[in-house]
Image (tube, rainbow, N blue to C red):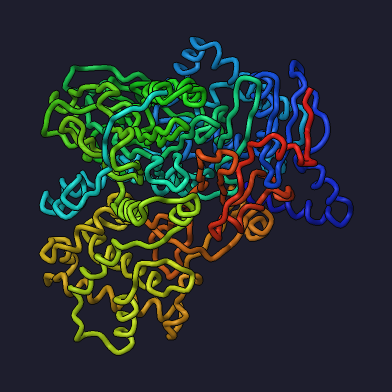
């Protein structure tokens, strides 16, 4: 790419400059942790940076605290903020060049531009929230004007632009999109149904079945479309993927008070997603984890309550086909009548090239999408997304979450969220524990409608739906068993209704439930151990199903040795384990030999790394008579035994070729590694400067310590996502609560806080989240704002 050639030239110049004084310039770019900063309107505010770079902001007012937060956040993450505001707004090609044009076109067609405008207007109705939002933006923009220019801006030639509330809403639009699994699943299932027949759907875990493990509901209170892998692979910022969270009531803890754990699973990147900050004023205190360019923490605790989130995984996006008028391309029809498209022109700016003008087609059902989503069928297909249909005031929601006085206030705040769907875990000093699945839910009035498929907008029955009140959302408040947990599984039915979604398999749910039930009472240390555990008992059942299909007489001595290792595996994913290397290689080969011949290479690539495949793994192996076992590209009809045996033999052969003929060398540590990658680290030279890693990692796909990888050809499993933080909060001693993140607070590679948490994160250790003022003020790193 032309842009990266230019970047290399600049980096080379910088490296040469180190020998003639350039090192001083690079030191100049480091964030400031000592001294005095003048910001107009801010009265004396002190910031102490602790040993891991977390700012503790002591201010006389929340407004001043928010301004200072914006400033210190920007000095560490301005580059990250710049990326975030450009994704959903369709402005990546402007800085990265023509290779990102299709990403910009994709997001432009989502229809969020109009939604963002509505959200900005609605912000005026809440002056207090608007005041704090603007204070935060003032701090960011002040740093942009007075502070140093991030090296990434210089490398790419980015011109600085002040941030506005609109940019914040584009960040939330991207976050909402990253939960939308419909793009990966619905078009594939529609293709299977239309081209292969319903028989092929039976062994896919499309809906909940007898093997599903449910997220439980309870309520008692105490006082107080299309294949988009090629798009996603180009995104310079990670996606939100899954998560764990559990909260124990006092009856289940050794401390006699609530214990809280949460670890949202997000794609890895450098800098990492979260920025920690602690704010204290005479009327407000909060220790939070902030997303870039978002003024309120999405994970937080104070002395009264704690909250965290996981992904609900509900289905909030439908695809509809409509009729195109063959004589007039500006007209279309649905079951509701005949219409003219609303045509919206948008200019996509491209670095070093002329802009590209695209035409967005808006209909009464949503934006036409299949012109950018190549593999939906030839009829115009529109996307209908709750995020656009029911624009939520996400800033107001987040403000309410962080300013609640009790569990009732917190519930009222999250009830206003429409999209994305989120599970919120909650615990407080009054001994309440809670779990809510928040998001605007709906159901189609016709029982024959399955939203996992592309729907027919020409059929009125498929268009009719009912919006549900928040009282219909799944929740569990102070259940009698003494704990709540969430791991992205299907929630239990509410009034007989199971809400459709793209829920994950039961593996982590089983492990969390076993871990909590293993002891009568759990300690803080038990919570840490459970969060870092990596045993998966569900894979043992899968292995039994695989062995049942193996034709043992066809295995040679070496293959039998490999099978013996796999058979004796207890499900642990330690660095010296060998069985995980075999199991995940075999899993991919089985999937490929089973599904790719019917699906085709492109759909299989989407399927193999989807939530659907994770659930299907626990189902299709149990049906030796499934139609999927036959290879449609051969004349004979293959059997379950033939596919399993050939997959096992080829897996062993590939591992032997890639890792050697000594099975003892096939250790998990050699193949399961993580590198925290910077968005610019496409070239070896840049990797050495910006990347953190590689490191061998324990854990695996769908263990509690969910260190995830994509299934691909090859013998290595490169970790690309996992716990974005691990938090354990103890309401018997709130000042001794703990957290850790993958790398560090800073986005600048020469900062002491760029990767200082990595060793603790990789080895399952934690840092204390400081809240004791006397302890905090022992730090010598102090900034004064006035």
User: Residue drawn 40% across and 55% down?
Assistant: 704
Residue 353 in view in this figure:
no
Please, is residue 687 above or below residue 159 in the view?
below
Image quarter of residue 290: top right
The residue nearer to you, when weighing 655 against 376, is 655
Q: Quadrant of the C terminus?
A: top right
Instruction: Name which residue lies at 28% across and 17% down.
Output: 340
Q: Is residue 392 left or right of residue 298?
A: left
Where residue 267 appears, as percent x and y from the top left, is 48, 48
Image coordinates for residue 30, horizontal then vertical, percent: 77, 43
Query: Residue pushed farthest right?
Result: 20
Residue 554 visible in the snapshot:
yes
Q: In x, y percent, where is residue 168? A: 54, 26
Q: Residue at x 19, y 25 (%)?
A: 463
Q: Is residue 650 above or below residue 452?
A: below
In the displayed orientation, state which residue is furthest to the bottom: 557
Residue 401 x/y as whole percent = 47, 26
Indicate whether 635 appears above or below 409. below
As rendered, which of 387 and 335 lies closer to the eye?
387
Residue at image point 60% right, 27% down: 285
Q: Is residue 436 above or below residue 282?
A: below
> Which sits in the foreground, 119 or 294?
294
């Amino acid at each position: 790419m032309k842009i990266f050639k230019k970047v290399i030239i600049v980096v080379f110049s910088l490296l040469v400059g180190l020998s003639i004084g350039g090192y001083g310039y690079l030191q100049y770019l480091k964030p400031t942790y000592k001294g005095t900063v003048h910001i107009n309107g801010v009265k004396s505010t002190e910031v102490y940076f602790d040993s891991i770079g977390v700012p503790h902001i002591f201010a006389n007012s929340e407004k001043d605290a928010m301004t200072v937060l914006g400033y210190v956040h920007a000095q560490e993450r301005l580059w990250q903020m710049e990326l975030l505001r450009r994704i959903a707004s369709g402005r990546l090609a402007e800085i990265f060049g023509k290779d990102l044009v299709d990403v910009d076109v994709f997001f432009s067609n989502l229809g969020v531009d109009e939604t963002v405008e509505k959200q900005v207007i609605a912000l005026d109705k809440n002056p207090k929230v608007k005041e704090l939002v603007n204070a935060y933006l003032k701090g960011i923009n002040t740093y942009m004007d007075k502070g140093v220019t991030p090296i990434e801006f210089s490398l790419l030639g980015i011109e600085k632009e002040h941030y506005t509330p609109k940019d914040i809403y584009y960040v939330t639009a991207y976050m909402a999109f990253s939960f939308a699994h419909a793009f990966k699943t619905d078009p594939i299932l529609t293709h299977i149904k239309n081209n292969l027949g319903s028989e092929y759907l039976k062994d896919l875990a499309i809906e909940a079945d007898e093997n599903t493990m449910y997220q439980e509901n309870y309520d008692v209170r105490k006082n107080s479309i299309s294949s988009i892998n090629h798009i996603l692979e180009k995104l310079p910022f990670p996606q939100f993927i899954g998560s764990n969270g559990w909260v124990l009531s006092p009856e289940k803890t050794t401390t006699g008070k609530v214990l809280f754990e949460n670890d949202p699973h997000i794609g890895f990147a450098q800098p990492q997603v979260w920025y920690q900050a602690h704010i204290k004023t005479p009327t407000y205190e909060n220790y939070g984890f902030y997303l870039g360019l978002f003024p309120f923490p999405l994970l937080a605790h104070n002395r009264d309550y704690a909250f965290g989130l996981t992904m609900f995984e509900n289905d909030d996006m439908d695809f509809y086909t409509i009729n195109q008028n063959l004589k007039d391309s500006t007209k279309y029809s649905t079951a509701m009548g005949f219409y003219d498209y609303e045509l919206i022109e948008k200019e996509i700016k491209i670095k070093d090239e002329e802009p590209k003008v695209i035409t967005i087609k808006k209909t009464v059902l949503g934006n036409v999408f299949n012109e950018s989503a190549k593999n939906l069928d030839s009829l115009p297909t529109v996307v209908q997304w709750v995020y656009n249909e029911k624009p939520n005031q996400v800033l107001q929601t987040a403000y309410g979450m962080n300013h609640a006085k009790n569990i009732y206030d917190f519930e009222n705040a999250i009830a206003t969220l429409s999209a994305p769907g989120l599970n919120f875990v909650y615990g407080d000093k009054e001994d309440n524990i809670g779990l809510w699945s928040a998001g605007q839910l709906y159901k189609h009035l016709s029982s024959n409608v399955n939203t996992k498929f592309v729907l027919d907008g020409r059929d009125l029955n498929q268009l009719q739906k009912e919006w549900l009140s928040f009282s219909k959302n799944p929740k569990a408040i102070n259940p009698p068993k003494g704990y709540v947990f969430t791991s992205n599984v299907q929630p239990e039915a509410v009034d007989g209704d199971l809400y459709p979604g793209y829920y994950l398999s039961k593996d982590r749910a089983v492990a969390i439930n076993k871990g909590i039930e293993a002891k009568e009472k759990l300690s803080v240390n038990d919570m840490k151990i459970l969060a870092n555990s990596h045993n998966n008992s569900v894979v043992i059942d899968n292995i039994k199903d695989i062995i049942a299909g193996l034709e043992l007489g066809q295995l040679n001595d070496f293959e039998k040795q490999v099978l013996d290792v796999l058979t004796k595996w207890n499900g642990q994913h330690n660095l010296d384990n060998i069985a995980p290397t075999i199991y995940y290689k075999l899993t991919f080969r089985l999937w490929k030999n089973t599904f790719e011949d019917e699906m085709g290479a492109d759909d299989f690539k989407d399927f193999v790394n989807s939530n659907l495949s994770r659930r299907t793994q626990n189902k299709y192996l149990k049906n030796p008579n499934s139609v999927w076992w036959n290879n449609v590209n051969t004349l004979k009809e293959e059997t379950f035994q033939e596919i399993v045996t050939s997959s096992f033999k080829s897996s062993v052969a590939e591992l032997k070729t890639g890792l050697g003929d000594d099975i003892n060398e096939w250790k998990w540590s050699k193949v399961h590694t993580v590198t925290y990658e910077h968005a610019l680290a496409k070239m070896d030279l840049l990797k050495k400067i910006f990347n953190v890693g590689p490191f061998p990692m324990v854990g695996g796909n769908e263990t509690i310590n969910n260190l995830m990888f994509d299934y691909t050809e090859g013998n290595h499993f490169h970790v690309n996502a996992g716990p974005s933080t691990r938090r354990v909060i103890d309401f018997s001693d709130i000042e001794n609560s703990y957290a850790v993140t993958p790398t560090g607070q800073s986005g600048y590679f020469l900062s002491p806080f760029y990767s200082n948490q990595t060793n603790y994160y990789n080895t399952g250790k934690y840092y204390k989240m400081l809240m004791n003022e006397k302890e905090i003020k022992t730090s010598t790193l102090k900034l004064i704002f006035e």
